[in-house]
Amino acid sequence: MFAARRVRALPRAVDGASFAGPGVDLLGRSAEEALSAAAPIARWLEAREPGIAVRSISIDRGKMRVLVTLEAAPKPRVLRIEGAPATELIDEAAPLEALLAREVYAALRARLG
């Protein structure tokens, strides 16, 4: 379902602007927990397009939009999901967002010392 076993999280800035710093890479156990939390989203996508390999998922709560990059030949392709389907996916993502928020907060705090 997922093309890679790693996760890059880019938090939203406090003021709602795009995050200006480097993202947080989750590897190993942290990545596996995040991918497990993202499984409902992947299953939703798989039900609509069997055999897909998800490269990335981007959730924009402000625009109520989900962007998904899929592995495809000769190059990856992007699905833009809006409206009721996006709302459904965003609802499914709540546990994933909570987990990523904890992981990102811990990583950024560690960076700052």
Image: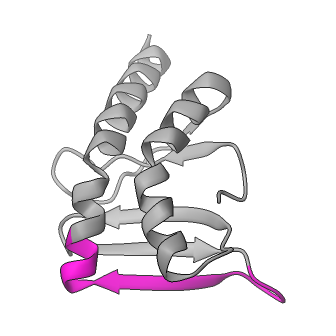
Position in image of residue 38 (x %, y %): 45, 49
In front of the other: 101 or 15: 101
Q: Quadrant of the C terminus?
A: top left
Residue occupying the point 31% across, 52% down: 93
Residue with the most extreme right position: 74
- Side (left or right) of 92 relative to 51: left
Q: Quadrant of the N terminus?
A: bottom right
User: Residue 76 magenta-drawn?
Assistant: yes
Residue occupying the point 72% across, 59% down: 3
Model colouring? one colour
- Side (left or right) of 6 relative to 109: right
Is 49 placed above or below 53 here? below
Is 101 placed above or below 106 here? below
| Magenta region | 72-87
In front of the other: 43 or 95: 43
In front of the other: 8 or 72: 72
User: Residue 112 magenta-drawn?
Assistant: no
Position in image of residue 46 (x %, y %): 54, 71
Question: Number of numbered discs present?
Answer: 0
Residue occupying the point 39% across, 37% down: 100
In front of the other: 19 or 65: 65
- Side (left or right) of 28 relative to 14: right
Position in image of residue 31 (x %, y %): 59, 34
Is 109 placed above or below 11 here? above
Position in image of residue 13 (x %, y %): 26, 48
Residue with the most extreme top position: 113
Residue occupying the point 27% across, 84% down: 82
